Image: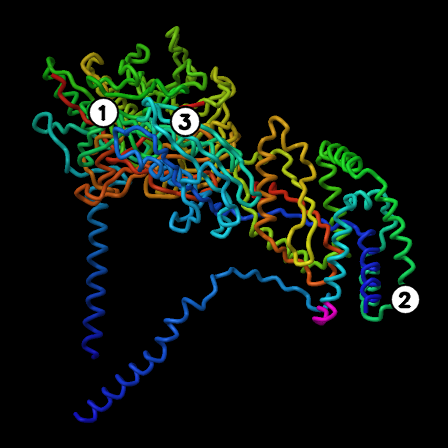
Amino acid sequence: MTKNLFFSFLFHALVIFLTALSLPFMLREPIDLPPIVSVEFIEIKDKTYIPFAPKAREIIDKAKEEEKRIVSEQAPPSAKAKEKPDRIPMPEDKKQKKEMVKKKQNPEEIKPEIRQSSEFEKKELFDTNEIAALIDKAKEEQANTQKKTDKLTQSSVKNSFAQALSLSEEDALRAQIFGCWSVPLGLPYDKNLLVRIKLKLKPDGTILKSEILDHARMNTPGQSFYKILAESALRAVRICQPLKVPPTGYDRWKDLQLNFDPTEMLKG
Amino acid sequence: MKFNLALRNLLIVLFGALVLSACSTTKKGDLSGDVYTGTETIEYLAKGVPDRVFFATNKSSLTTAARDTLRKQATWLRKNKDISVTVEGHADERGTREYNLALGERRANAAKDYLMTYGISGKRISVISYGKEKPVNPASNPLAWSQNRRSVSVKAN
Amino acid sequence: MKKIIILFLYIILSFSKAQALIKVDITRGNLDPLPVAISPLHVDGKSEKFSLFEVNKLGSEISKIIEQNIKSTGLFNPLNKDAFVQKPDIAHLKPRFEDWRLIKAQALVTGKLLIKDDKLKVEFRLWDLTAAKEMLALSFTTTPNNWRRVAHIISDKIYERLTGEGGYFDTRIIYVSETGPKDQRVKKLALMDQDGYNIKYLTLGNELVLTPRFNPTNQLVTYMSYFKNLPRVYLLDIETGIQEIVGNFPGMTFAPRFSPDGKKIIMSFAKDGNSDIYSMDIETRIVEQITKHPSIDTSPSYSPDGKYVAFNSDRSGLQQIYVMRSDGTGVKRITHGKGIYGTPVWSPRGDLIAFTKVRKGRFYIGVMRSDGSGERLLTENFYQEAPSWSPNGRVLIFYRETKSDKTGKGFSAKLWSIDITGYNERRVKTETDASDPSWSSLLSK
């Protein structure tokens, strides 16, 4: 009898003790717990880009700050890309060079820099508005030959990816935007639903500037759905800020084009 | 302990037997295929003259038993020349409403046509379909549905 | 050190100049409800008294209706008002976008109202919070008693602006109200707003009434009644209450529906055990027989262009769905799946046909393309049928009956809705049990 009583006492004490121990946690937890965030299982290859040491990073960021100011005054970069496609060095090469430069500060690299900057100045002479208008025209034409263009962009996209963003980086960015994009459901799925948005990003992935490329379609009669779709895509990008961009290689992705197309999803 | 186990087994067997016998009684007693063959819900127009016949799911063909009943009705109608009837056609609740209305009409007409082949004038027989709207048995089970798939001859005057 | 920085700068610049534009394809998004904030409408202090309740509550009542409406679509998530960062009385100002973004709202509705000279004036604005701009600004003037409709119209405008398709809130539903035990049901025609308010009973329940359907202008209703024990199709003017039998058929007529131009009623006529499809021109009273087949042909429904009719027939042995030209030629069976198919109803968009399917003792509501391909079953239950489309072709309303026990207890008939993706199934609340719902078109066009 006394033995039983003793055990009972012991266990009760234990229970009370445990409760006492756990209680403070329970009290604290709701405050400490961050809001539940759904985790996307996308691995970013850590080998692709090794983050810089804090000091180096500071320097680069500063440099980028400077550069940003200049960049924002120039004509849209896509124009350059279109006009002189052969001038574009392969991104892989660039990356290597850049890293080399950053690490060794190889003086040899100054050469291309001068050449390029001279071209840069030439650009400035252009009336930027005129260029923009030209681009717009080109784009409208593109939009008119929708299907072909679609396929073209997509295949070319794949090529540029291979060299520009690693697959995992691309997936991470894509997955992030998937999550932010509330697709409007009233869309006709037999129409062209491609919305192309060009972004100019800050190094931290926030958006400096966003532009809908086919904005002529925004106010086309009978295409009111397009405006709604384009707006939803813009909202997605804004909500997603800062975008999950790679920690390095700002130059590669500071101009980014997102092609939103819900056709596949709406059909399936 | 052993005894308990034996008892439990016995109970299980007993219960199973009960369930089985319950099943078989409904089947043998009241349903043939899925046509009701029992006597529940039936009313009589006169002694020995049942007022209704039953149908299989989605069907309006008359079974042997149905023809038998309708012959009795025809005999009774021949004897009582001043009586006219309304044949009400019904369906069970397991079909869409509009189709059931048509089905009820088809069942009622099947009965009417049979009565007419036994010499009853079509003028004495009117037809109305209620589809699934007027179940005689409100339950939701195969037995109730079989009782509701019916055409009923009702004195109209 | 400075040199190094400048060097860096130049190098980076040089590369950025020659950069290929990276393109990323976004082919998927989420279908999570869009978070929106519906701020209570600000009630102008100069407002006159309101006959139904305190005028100050009108603003929040209207916003509540908007909230319920857009929430019921499953596409929007109206945020809790407790979290709101701005009071409604700043409705005339631009919202502080950053503050609203903090509570994760993507769109905001603000507005104000005024009752003056017995007129209710409501202004509202829809804001895109992420883009910090106004998307829509409208104002409505009506009699104060119409306040619920104003809320519905605003809901429609918001829905249209954010989804790109037409709304369906400023609509009514006509249905059959059911009371009493299963074997002695009392059925009345009833009319209500899409959200279940403003119920009106159009018949007294003395006779059995079934399958009411609106005409395209929502003023007429065609339905089936057993008045004087003669089951016939009727035409009822819901504004005047005048009604009449459709046509002069020597037998049961049933399953009526209007043609899309409202000029004809198409229905079944049963004679000698055979049901065929007929149409009658309301104006000229000319009756046309459309099908002629010794089988049950019923539940006809016109395509929105009026050129075709879908119906169900058991000419193959079991109930299946067929499509024909509206003159009865070119009959083609479109369902070939296992089970039986009935109650085809053509979507107002024209691309889909909704139907009821029965298979292995279970009832399904589904949609398929008008050639019978792409069948999608949306919901399965013990018993459900009679789908009717919302005017925008996104939602189906239908009725569902529950199983009863041996004494008939446990039976119920309720209205339900589901959208064509198969999501967002919900009860449509009615005062009594209900069946045979039919959705009106938009009341204000």
Instruction: Return the residue nearer the eye: C225 or A241.
Output: A241
Segment colored magenta: A51-57
Q: Secondary structure at mark 2?
A: helix
The subunit carrying tag 1 is: C
Question: Would you identify the image quadrant in which residue B9 lies?
Answer: bottom left
Residue shown at 81% from the left, 46% from the top:
A81
Amino acid type at image mark 2: Pro
Tell me, what colour scheme is on the image?
rainbow
Which residue occupies the extreme top position in the image? C284
Location of the C terminus of chain C by quadrant is top left
B10 relative to B135, above or below: below
Are tags 3 and 1 found on a single chain?
yes
In the rendered structure, the answer to whether residue A97 lies left or right of residue C282 reads: right
Question: Would you identify the image quadrant in which residue B104 lies?
Answer: top left
Amino acid type at image mark 1: Leu
Q: How far apart, in angstroms, are the residues tagged by discs 2 and 3?
A: 86 Å
Whichever of labels 3 and 1 marks the residue nearer the N terminus, that label is 1
Give the mark toward the camera: 2 or 1. Answer: 2
Q: Is residue C222 visible?
A: yes
Give the mark toward the camera: 3 or 1. Answer: 1
In the rendering, which numbered label is found on residue C313? 3
Local crowd at mark 3 within 10 Å, few (<14), some, or many (≥20)?
Answer: many
C63 relative to A168, above or below: above
In the rendering, which numbered label is found on residue C208? 1
Q: How far apart, in angstroms, are the residues tagged by discs 3 and 1?
A: 25 Å
Instruction: Return the residue nearer the eye: B49 or A174.
Output: A174
